[in-house]
Amino acid sequence: MKKFLSEKVNDQAILDVVFEASQNARAAIKEHGSENVVNGVFGAYFKEEGGLLTFDTVYRTLDEVPDVEKARYAASISGAPEFKKGVKYWLFEKAGIEIDCDIIATPGGTGALSSTVKNTLAPGETVIHPEIGWGPYKTIAKQHNVGIETYKNFDGDRFNLEAFSAVCEKVMEEQGKVLVFINDPCQNPTGYTIEDEEWDAITDFLDTLSEKGPIVMLVDIAYIDFTHKGDDYKQTFKRFENMSDNVLTVLAFSASKTMTAYGMRLGAQVLIGSTEERRTLFKNACENTCRGTWSTVNNGGMMTFASLALEEDKRNAYMKEKEAYLELLKERAEIFTREAEEAGLPLYPYKEGFFITIRIDDADRKNALHMKLQEHNIFFVNVKNGLRVAICSIPKEKVKGLARRVKEIYDPST
């Protein structure tokens, strides 16, 4: 007998390790008090005194958006013209770069990721992810009935070009095309940012591989506004425009994270490179996905971002406000990484961003430590080959001594 559900859907109860760990942390806070709990779980910025950080410049700009603009549909399926102009200015022109691109508004960076998978791969084909990466990459792949291949992130403390290349070559041989995800800068969950010479090697390799078939390189830039390189990082994008016509780069931009407006669900797919004709066809497909999946995105959010990006006084005020929190994030990270090194607590190579990951290759030992830490009211996220520490959510006073405490629980003999 037929079921209500399609045979292709995933009908298992969703188990999101971040939300599960967050629920456990909240329960501990309720029982023991927030001062006695280290909540290094949720990937959102928390202030030193506790509570979710909300940029005043963002929310006062949102207040100025007329109610009718907040209530109305967007002017276009692909996003409000002001928003697209703002995204182009923010990612390119603000950094002194002129890049020919197409922009499609999406509900958060997640919408950009999902649409790219849907419009690049047929069911049964394969997407390539980093081995240590954001968990929902796998969920998105399953939603679209595509398989997953992973590449090892690191060779020592560097990007593992050899592993990356081998997996891309394997998938190209098997299916004649490649869709590969790269999360940069401030990679979630390790906090690694790819160096210029590493980007040169990646793009040179993909150019050569594209002689065998089309390549879509999706660069997840969710944390681009939290790199210490600032607009200098965006010079990376010039490489993508100059690649082979058989390589299309898709930037998955999260305006939600940029604005500390996580629940606003606002992002964009930014298409770079290839030919105008091939980009237009891809854009058309993505616009059909918009109409058939979420229709249009939050118009009030788009108007807010457009004002922040395009109005100089608001933009400057935002940048000044953000800079103080970038410095605070750096201070938290420096405390943890320095003390981890002193204590002998192994970490993946961290450079910047919201997250640091404790390296534990043995799964049984990792899982045991994860549970033991919770007994001590220390909450992290259990990821592939490690435990993710959301340094963005832990005040400095709680960061101090934390690495040593974890190391003592990890290895009581020390």
Image: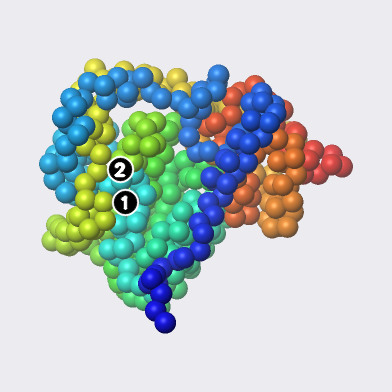
Q: Can residue 236 be seen in the rendering of this structure?
A: no
Closest to the observer: 210 or 114?
114
Closer to us: 33 or 216: 33
Picture quadrant of residue 307:
top left
Residue under the image location 72 percent in, 47 percent down:
371
Q: Residues within 10 Å of mark 1 (few under 14, many from 20)?
A: many
Q: Quadrant of residue 179?
A: bottom left
> Of label 2 and label 1, which has the lower sequence position?
1
Q: Residues within 10 Å of mark 2 (few under 14, many from 20)?
A: many
The image's mark for residue 48 is none
Image coords of residue 84 (percent x, y): 19, 40
Who's the residue at 34% across and 61% down the image?
Answer: 117
Coordinates of residue 396 in the picture (x, y in percent): 61, 23
Question: Residue 112 versus residue 341: which sits nearer the camera?
Answer: 112
In this picture, is 3 found above or below 42?
below
Residue at image location 17% in from the left, 41% down from the top:
73
Residue at the right extreme of this rendering: 413
Q: Looking at numbered disc 1 in the image, what kind of residue is underneath it?
A: Ala
Depicted 155 relative to depicted 232: above or below: below
Q: Secondary structure at mark 2?
A: strand
State left or right for residue 40 relative to residue 232.
Answer: right
Disc 2 marks which amino acid? Gly
Query: Badge 1 is on which residue?
Result: 112
Q: Is residue 289 above or below residue 396?
A: below
Q: Secondary structure at mark 1?
A: helix
Relative image position of residue 200 (x, y in whole percent)? 38, 52
Q: Which residue in the protein does label 2 denote?
A: 267
Q: Where's the C terminus, which quadrant? A: top right
Identify which residue, 298 or 362, lies in the foreground.
Answer: 298
**Residues at marks 2 and 1 touching, judged by CB atoms closer than 8 Å:** yes
Q: Left of 230 or right of it: where is 148?
A: right
Q: Residue furthest bottom?
A: 1
